[in-house]
Image: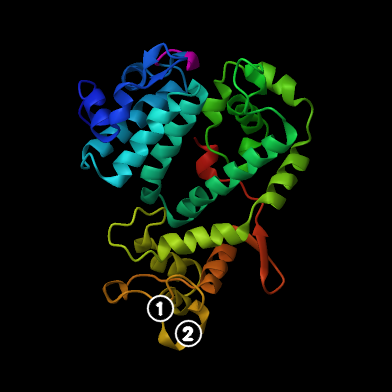
Amino acid sequence: GPDLSGQVKAIIESSVPDAASMRGQRGQKLVTQMLLDCYSHGLFTLGPPESPVNKQIVPALRYILGEMSKLKPSDPKRVSCLSTLVEACQDCQQVQAREILRIFGDLTAQNETFELQLKYSLLREKEAALNRFITRQHKGCDLDHTQVRPCQQRAHLVSGYTMLIGEALGLDGMVAARSDRFLPEVLKEIGRVKQNEVLDALQRDMSVKEWLQTLLADINNQASTADRLINRDCIFNWVKQNMSAETAYLVFYDEDRAEEFAGQDPERPTDENQYQPFLSCKVLLDMLSTAKMVAKIGADRAEVAKRPSKRARGR
């Protein structure tokens, strides 16, 4: 895309006016200048522009700002993305790297196959479970640098655990975690842990119900301007290819199966969306089971399957 380095400040401030006076790097630099520096050559604590992580960060941030510049300054999606970047600048560069790559992933996920879109949607559940685990295991992880050492802070502990279990769990951000300058001290702080025990703890803590609700809310969203994780256009063909032609028609709403949708919000599609996929929880669970993303336990229970994300492993 075009070089927007001369417009970075204006793009940000037009959507997040407060950014004009906000500072990061412990008050040393305006956040707009920090983002311009990152746009140009990456995050300095993570190495030179040609370092592995900055080779991801620079094009990711350029893509984000390029996409946001196409939207109106008041567009909620633009305001949300740019606000997140601005707020991240008030934290350490490890957090900035993580947020840039997360937003980039959100913006590009719909270009992936249906299975990879599903796996990406599960990343948020995995990250939330890891953060809850860190809260339980490391008291004081949210105190600032005047009270605890960097290796005891959440931002860097996430890097440590990502290195230890990220590949097995299918987390994003392996390259960024490897570039954390406090990683050796963090690994000492974590100490000897058994990978399987951590993975089991995280899996027990992940809620399949919440993930199903998130997917249903995303796929069944009736707003024409909905910002989706899952591209509805690929659902019918995926089911037809991986389940059966007959089952593929179950991805649409049917009055004869109205009881399947009872209690969902919404319970039926609008007229303008009647030819778009509209899933019941039952059909979605069958799809996830076919994709080997959940393991059914009895008639009405399921757990997240132990299967790493190929997309995450490749990042």
Residue found at x 62% / y 37%: 167
Contact flag, marks 2 and 1 (Cβ < 8 Å) = yes
Q: Position of residue 52 (x, y in %)?
A: 47, 22
Residue found at x 52% / y 80%: 260
**Is residue 211 found left or right of 107 in the rendered image?**
right
Residue found at x 42% / y 30%: 87
Q: Based on the displayed image, in which of its 4 quarters is residue 295 positioned?
A: bottom right
User: Can I make out residue 4 in this image?
Assistant: no
Q: Position of residue 129 (x, y in %)?
A: 64, 44
The magenta segment is 45-49
Residue 48: say if magenta: yes
> Is the stretch drawn in magenta largely helix, strand or loop?
loop
Dot 1: within a 10 Å radius of its alpha carbon, few (fewer than 14), some, or many (20 or more) residues? many
Q: Secondary structure at mark 2?
A: helix
Q: Secondary structure at mark 1?
A: loop
Q: Position of residue 82 (x, y in %)?
A: 34, 34
Q: Is 58 drawn above or below residue 261 in the view shown?
A: above
In the image, 167 versus 222, the foreground residue is 222
Q: Position of residue 282 (x, y in %)?
A: 55, 73
Residue on which disc 2 sits: 257
Please state which amino acid type lies under the numbered disc 2: Arg
Residue found at x 36% / y 38%: 81
Residue 253 image label: 1
Residue 173: say if magenta: no
User: Can I make out residue 193 in this image?
Assistant: yes
Q: Based on the displayed image, in which of its 4 quarters is residue 69 positioned?
A: top left
Residue 312 image label: none
* Gap between marks 2 and 1 measured at Cα: 8 Å
Please state which amino acid type lies under the numbered disc 1: Tyr
Is the image coloured rainbow, by chain, by secondary structure, or in one colour? rainbow
